[in-house]
Image (cartoon, rainbow, N blue to C red):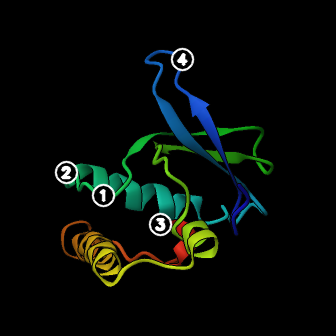
Amino acid sequence: GEGTFGAVFKATVKATGEQVALKKIKVRSADDDGGAGREVAALSRVRERGDHPNVAALRGAWTEGAPGSETHCLAVELVDGGELFDHLVNHGGFSEQTAADLFKAVFGAIQWLHARASCVHCDIKPENF
């Protein structure tokens, strides 16, 4: 899908066969990396601090292309099942208990990011869960 900073594709790691979400972020100018540098740093801090069951893990990061027209690539653990937003649109919501369980999981992950990895998620919306 398309996002604010780039596009995300489903990809397969040749060496392992693992499927990942491959996020490609095009550099807009020499002094603007499209937020990729901050995202790689944040995901690296998350990886250093251990795993959380509700936080997708960074599998790898690299840069493609010539200087000035680079594309930053982030391979992140693939989370299948669709977006929370699509479920809300297609099914009209959740039971009270299911909604409570979902919010507990989401806010637990956000709290872990803040406390353990010193990260702030700047794009909290149903499309990202």
- Give the residue at mark 1: 45
Instruction: Point out residue 49 in the picture as x, y percentages from the top left corner.
Output: 20, 55
- Give the residue at mark 2: 50
- The Cα–Cα distance between marks 1 and 2, rounded to whole angstroms, is 9 Å
- The Cα–Cα distance between marks 2 and 3, rounded to whole angstroms, is 20 Å
Task: Give the SS element for disc 4.
Answer: loop
- Give the residue at mark 4: 14
Q: State which quarter of the image contains the N terminus.
A: bottom right
Residue 93: which disc?
Answer: none
Report if the CB atoms under discs 1 and 3 are less than 8 Å apart: no
Report if the CB atoms under discs 1 and 4 are less than 8 Å apart: no
Task: Give the SS element for disc 3.
Answer: loop
Task: Give the SS element for disc 2.
Answer: loop
- The Cα–Cα distance between marks 1 and 3, rounded to whole angstroms, is 20 Å
Residue type, label 4: Lys
Q: Identify the residue at horizontal 23%, vertical 56% (top origin).
A: 52
For marks 4 and 3, the one nearer the N-term is 4
Q: Identify the residue at horizontal 55%, vertical 67% (top origin).
A: 87
- Please state which of the two labelled residues, at mark 4 or mark 3, is closer to the viewer: 3
For marks 1 and 2, the one nearer the N-term is 1
Instruction: Point out residue 117 in the picture as x, y percentages from the top left corner.
Output: 25, 66
For marks 1 and 4, the one nearer the N-term is 4
Q: Identify the residue at horizontal 28%, vertical 69% (top origin).
A: 109
Report if the CB atoms under discs 4 and 3 are less than 8 Å apart: no
Residue density around tag 3, few if under 14, some if 14–19, many if 20 or more, within 10 Å: some
- Please state which of the two labelled residues, at mark 1 or mark 4, is closer to the viewer: 4
Residue type, label 3: Phe
Residue density around tag 2, few if under 14, some if 14–19, many if 20 or more, within 10 Å: few
- Give the residue at mark 3: 129
For marks 2 and 3, the one nearer the N-term is 2
